[in-house]
Image (spheres, grey):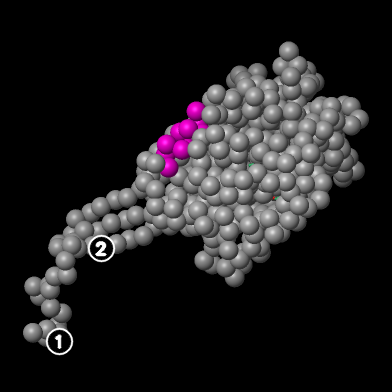
Amino acid sequence: MSVTTQLIDNQWQAGLGHDFSSINPSNGEVVWQGKTATAEQVADAIKAARSAQLGWADMTLEERIVILENFAAELKEHSEEFATIIARETGKPLWETRTEVGAMTGKIAISIRAYNERTGTTENPMPGAKAFIRHKPHGVVAVFGPYNFPGHLPNGHIVPAILAGNTVVFKPSELTPHVAEFTLKLWLKAGLPAGVINLVQGEVDTGIALASHQDIDGLFFTGSSNTGHLLHKQFAGHPGKILALEMGGNNPLIVKDVADVSAAVHDIIQSGFITSGQRCTCSRRLFIENSANGDAILEKLIAATKQIKVADSFSEDQPFMGAMISEKAALGMVAAQQQLLDMGATSLVELKHLEPGTGFVSPGIIDVTAVKDMPDEEHFGPLIKVYRYTDFDSAINEANNTSFGLSAGLLSDDSDDYQHFLKRIRAGIVNWNRPITGASSAAPFGGIGASGNHRASAYYAADYCAYPVASVEAEKVNLPQTLAPGLIIE
Ligand SMILES: NC(=O)C1=CN([C@@H]2O[C@H](COP(=O)(O)OP(=O)(O)OC[C@H]3O[C@@H](n4cnc5c(N)ncnc54)[C@H](O)[C@@H]3O)[C@@H](O)[C@H]2O)C=CC1
Ligand SMILES: O=C(O)CCC(=O)N[C@@H](CCC(=O)O)C(=O)O
């Protein structure tokens, strides 16, 4: 049972709520056990963040950067241990969790650049005074993280938030408590002052206690669209609080006239099946032309999909896909596939639950061209839904026929096609002849519609971590040479 579950004011505490645990989805082993934070512990964490905030913001930017860079050094030093913890708790292959730790490390330098470029201080001369634009932190912000990148995605909110002078109460996914605990241990080694990042762990009730607390100034969320919508409703009537929502997608990838069929198949697989389909950017809908080229791509895709290696995170011969996050998630994908089959879809490669008690599934492809009234749902796993099309514009229209708008892509050798697509497609990430996953931290990252609330993360996270302050300043009060008409001051 972990007694280092909650970190409040740099003091580790056991939770005082109920038991919860995390399970390695590759083999059912219990990875971590602890108790949830109660509403009182959440309130204590917010109080600690509030007490620390002014002191933290009063430090110079350079002083805060030293702590952040120490954290990057700790990540580097403990990278293998950390990648192993992420792999055990999520089921992702080790090669992939190593890249997750790398992305966390890279986030520090990128956030510093973004802070200076997007929210730094600018000074402009004006007659008898100076005009300044500065940025100030909001205060205490809550950060909510998802399970699929339990290190990297919360880090994408936490690093820019504290860099800007905010303090944080972090509520990770209940499926990945060990990753969160290890992250905070590294922050402590980095010399983080008390109260700057507080960790509260638990399930939905802990999340509700944090999100609904009066004394937070904002909430940065990465997670499902359903939860994001609940939070958005909860924040209605609080225009003074900042809410950044990074949610899911029902992302389309259109393929049209490509000479290199193998390259197209590679990009389709990277888009649809990486992380066992558990990336918000994964393509869920694949549009393939009714043509000889389309047939060749589909045939090769089916053959390559059947050969995708699915195995344990630590297999010597590393797999492309590990287990999904849980057996429940795996069975959910089998049920989603069955629902589509019942609606008239045709299975091209069956997604199968591979081993009872684990999250292992094989990747699936299903042709949904004949299905009327397709549900506009994010199926968060390795199932590609194929739509055959004859007319490019109708494919683009159908690609846009979703309430989401996170990522979208076109595979085509014709640049005119891409210009046509780029103008019409509605999404925050639009790629051409590249996978639609693997977005860069050095670019804005966010979607439109049900995918977000116009507060893009990654490079633009700086924008929601601080508010602008415009000032006109002069060293002394000066009487203007010319007074306004009708004004006499003697
Ligand atoms: N747009 C983006 O940047 C990304 C979006 N995602 C999305 O995240 C989802 C997968 O992550 P999950 O962990 O399943 O998301 P989730 O929405 O279930 O959980 C996210 C966080 O919210 C908390 N939570 C859940 N219900 C809550 C409530 N009623 N009140 C307050 N807190 C609550 C959870 O405990 C967790 O900490 C997928 O839909 C995926 O598309 C994942 C990665 C990136
Ligand atoms: O937040 C960033 O620094 C960049 C965005 C990012 O890392 N996106 C990844 C994973 C997001 C997800 O789907 O869970 C990606 O686009 O693959």
Camera sees residue 393: no
Question: Residue 228 at what x, y percent from top left?
Answer: 66, 54
Q: Which residue is mark 2?
A: 472
Q: Residue at (32%, 50%) from the top-left corner? A: 121
Q: Which residue is mark 1?
A: 486
Most frequent secondary structure within the magenta stretch: helix
Camera sees residue 316: yes
Say left or right for 180 vs 304.
left
In the rendered view, would you say 387 is above or below 294? below
Q: Residue at (77%, 42%) from the top-left corner? A: 34
Q: Which residues are magenta?
A: 64-73
Say left or right for 459 vs 332.
left
Say left or right for 131 vs 417.
left
Q: At label 1, which amino acid type do we have?
A: Gly
Q: Residue at (19%, 63%) from the top-left corner? A: 474
In the rendered view, would you say 28 is above or below 484? above
Is the residue marked by circle 1 packed among few (<14), some (14-19), or many (20+) residues within 10 Å? few
Mark with earlier residue (1, 2)? 2
Cα gap from disc 1 to disc 2, whole angstroms: 25 Å
Q: Residue at (53%, 29%) from the top-left corner? A: 74
Mark 1 residue's CB less than 8 Å from ligand 2: no
Number of on-image labels: 2
Q: At label 2, which amino acid type do we have?
A: Val
Residue 70 in the magenta stretch? The answer is yes
In the foreground, 194 or 314: 194
Image quadrant where one finds the C terminus:
bottom left
- The quadrant holding residue 163 is top left
